[in-house]
Image (spheres, helix red, strand yellow):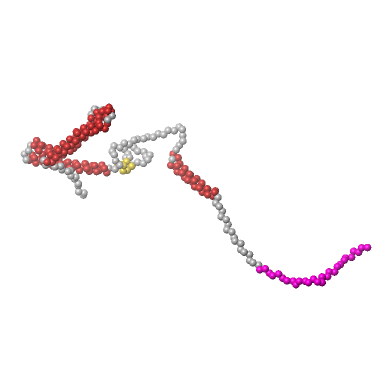
Amino acid sequence: MSSNAPVTAEVRPFPNAKVAPATEAPEVPVQPAAATPVEAPAKKKRSVRSFLLPIIAAGLLSAGAWYGYNYWTDGRFMISTDDAYVQADMAFISPKISGYVDQVKVIENQQVKAGDPLLVVDDGDYRIAVAQAEAQIATLSKTLDRIDAQTEAARALGLGDLQTMVLVILPQALRTIVPSLVGQFVWLIKGTSIISLLGVPELMHSGKVIIERTLRGFEVMIIIWLLYTSICYPLSVLGRYVESKLQLRGYANTKPTTIVENPV
């Protein structure tokens, strides 16, 4: 017959067992945690886009500025068409005097009428030429006055008109005109070569014909030069001889004097 009563057991300590006294473990000193180094934020690398965008913007601005300048200076005056023509009234100006332009009286595309001054030429050279001409005129006037006085003096001495001309006036006139007269003769002889352009058979033309036939230009031109020299040089020597003879007779070459008026 079974019993449902609870079974209990008594627990007793083992007799030989010794209980060790309770001891506390030594406390381990807590070391402060080392400060972890804070890393600096990494620099962001510049992308290619941020480098190219300013360059592209600068290029676009430059192209726009160039196009605007070109349009303002030239483009706005150009018209594209296929049925137009251009008419221009042009007049060529040919000045009759040479010189440097001092002032321009007109501007571009200005309408002018007949008689309107276009420019002013510097007249400095012409003023100098006029002053020189006036000085020469004054000198010649004084020379004529001197010759008139000498003529009156010769007549007062009892000389006739022919004697006055031969002994007083003509020597002075020859002394004055001999240099220019000889120079005119020499120039006239050399100037005859110009008529060779007209086909006149003179010395230069004949030399050209000989050169075309013989093809010896150097020798022919040397001969022509010797011929011209043989004609012109004796004339120059003759002029100097006549001038020296007149000087020996007392007709010295008087230099022209310039008349200078005192300023007021």
Name the image quarter holding residue 233: top left
The one nearer the camera, 10 or 154, is 10
Magenta residues, dominant SS class: loop
Q: Is residue 116 left or right of residue 33?
A: left
Extreme residue toward the left, this view: 158
Extreme residue toward the front, this view: 16
Q: Position of residue 175 (x, y in %)?
A: 14, 39
Q: How many marks?
A: 0
Q: Is residue 138 left or right of residue 83?
A: left
Q: Position of residue 254 (x, y in %)?
A: 15, 43
For the record, the magenta segment spans 1-29
Is residue 77 visible in the rendered image? The answer is yes
- For the N terminus, the image quarter is bottom right
Q: Is residue 213 left or right of residue 182?
A: right
Q: Position of residue 247 (x, y in %)?
A: 13, 41
Q: Residue at x 85, y 69 (%)?
A: 10
Name the image quarter holding residue 112: top left
Q: Is residue 134 left or right of residue 159?
A: right
Q: Residue at x 45, y 40 (%)?
A: 75
Is residue 136 a member of the stretch shown in magenta? no
Q: Residue at x 37, y 34 (%)?
A: 89
**Whether residue 207 is situated above or below residue 246 in the rendered picture:** above
Q: Residue at x 19, y 41 (%)?
A: 137
The one nearer the camera, 217 or 7, is 217
Is residue 194 visible in the rendered image? The answer is no
Q: Position of residue 221 (x, y in %)?
A: 25, 32
Is residue 20 a member of the stretch shown in magenta? yes
Name the image quarter holding residue 218: top left
